[in-house]
Image: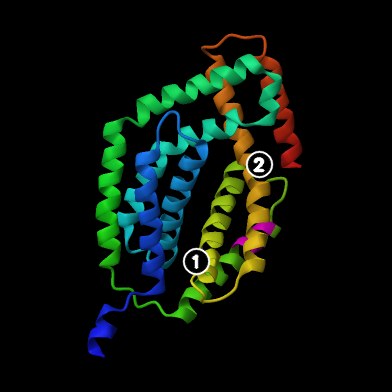
């Protein structure tokens, strides 16, 4: 009986180790020709792990920093993936093609085989380290922390007004992501069914995400157009800026 208690692993640690293991499997599949969905799933696994550690075990800052570093290495790739699949960009075919070329250049520069191997090595060490964490957070506290995060984000969302900055909207979007990951953890682990609140988070996250995605799309189009001189550039930037204005409303 004592042996079973000693070997018992908390639901949180099980969930975190599964997310890291998923990222470990996806990392070798990343390449300049791989489906953008592979990168997306890889990033979600890393973000879930980082978000839940930050929410439930903020003292584990070393894990948080390492996972943040991995995500930062793939930010530009994901932003260019989103931009290249943007329907509005089909009206500017030459610029769309240049976006895809830029994605390949960014991949070659920032995600070499050596860097990908380094990421895999870090994930392997993290997997072992996470399994060694002795978490004594009970079910009631796991639920209360997630629901408190939800209430705080909903309060901030209701307080949005014309003076709310794009950075504040972005931070709130991140807040809803963290909350959503926590609620999904509770639901998938069988601790509490939070599907209604998860749907609410997805809805808020999507509306806030449209603003941030458009901000980054304008940034990348401007960046590419500094080198790629085309008559498509100015009308494309105007179109995305008009969309951002509408979204801000």
Q: Main secondary structure of the magenta part?
A: helix
- Give me the disc on residue 99: none
x and y percentages locating residue 13 in the rendered image: 36, 68
Quarter of the image where one finds residue 7? bottom left
x and y percentages locating residue 32 in the rendered image: 43, 28
Name the N-terminal-most of marks 1 and 2.
Answer: 1
What residue did someone put label 1 on? 185
Task: Point out the frontmost of discs 1 and 2.
Answer: 1
- Give me the disc on residue 210: 2
Measured along the vertical axis of the image, is residue 33 above or below residue 51?
Answer: above
Quarter of the image where the C terminus is located? top right
x and y percentages locating residue 216 in the rendered image: 57, 33
Is 201 on the left-hand or right-hand side of 135?
right
SS for dot 2: helix
Q: For the residues marked 1 and 2, what is the alpha-carbon distance in whole angstroms?
A: 25 Å
The residue located at (58%, 57%) in the rendering is: 176
Q: Which residues are magenta?
A: 153-157
């Amino acid at each position: 009986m004592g042996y079973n208690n000693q070997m018992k692993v908390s639901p949180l640690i099980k969930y975190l180790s599964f997310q890291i293991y998923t990222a470990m499997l996806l990392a070798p599949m990343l390449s300049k020709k791989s489906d953008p969905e592979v990168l997306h799933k890889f990033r979600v696994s890393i973000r879930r792990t980082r978000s839940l550690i930050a929410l439930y075990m903020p003292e584990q800052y070393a894990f948080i920093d390492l996972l943040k570093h991995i995500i930062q290495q793939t930010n530009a790739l994901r932003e260019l993936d989103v931009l290249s699949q943007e329907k509005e960009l089909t009206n500017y075919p030459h610029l769309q093609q240049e976006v895809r070329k830029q994605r390949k250049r960014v991949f070659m520069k920032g995600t070499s085989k050596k860097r990908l191997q380094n990421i895999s090595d870090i994930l392997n060490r993290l997997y072992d380290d996470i399994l060694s964490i002795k978490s004594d957070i009970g079910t009631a506290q796991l639920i209360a922390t997630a629901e408190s995060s939800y209430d705080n984000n909903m309060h901030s969302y209701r307080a949005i007004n014309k003076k709310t900055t794009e950075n504040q909207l972005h931070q709130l979007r991140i807040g809803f992501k963290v909350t959503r990951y926590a609620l999904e953890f509770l639901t998938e682990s069988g601790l509490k069914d939070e599907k209604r609140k998860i749907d609410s988070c997805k809805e808020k996250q999507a509306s806030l995400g449209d603003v941030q995605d458009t901000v980054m799309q304008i940034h990348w189009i401007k960046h590419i157009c500094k080198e790629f001189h085309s008559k498509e550039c100015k009308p494309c930037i105007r179109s995305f800026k008009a969309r951002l204005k509408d979204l801000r409303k």
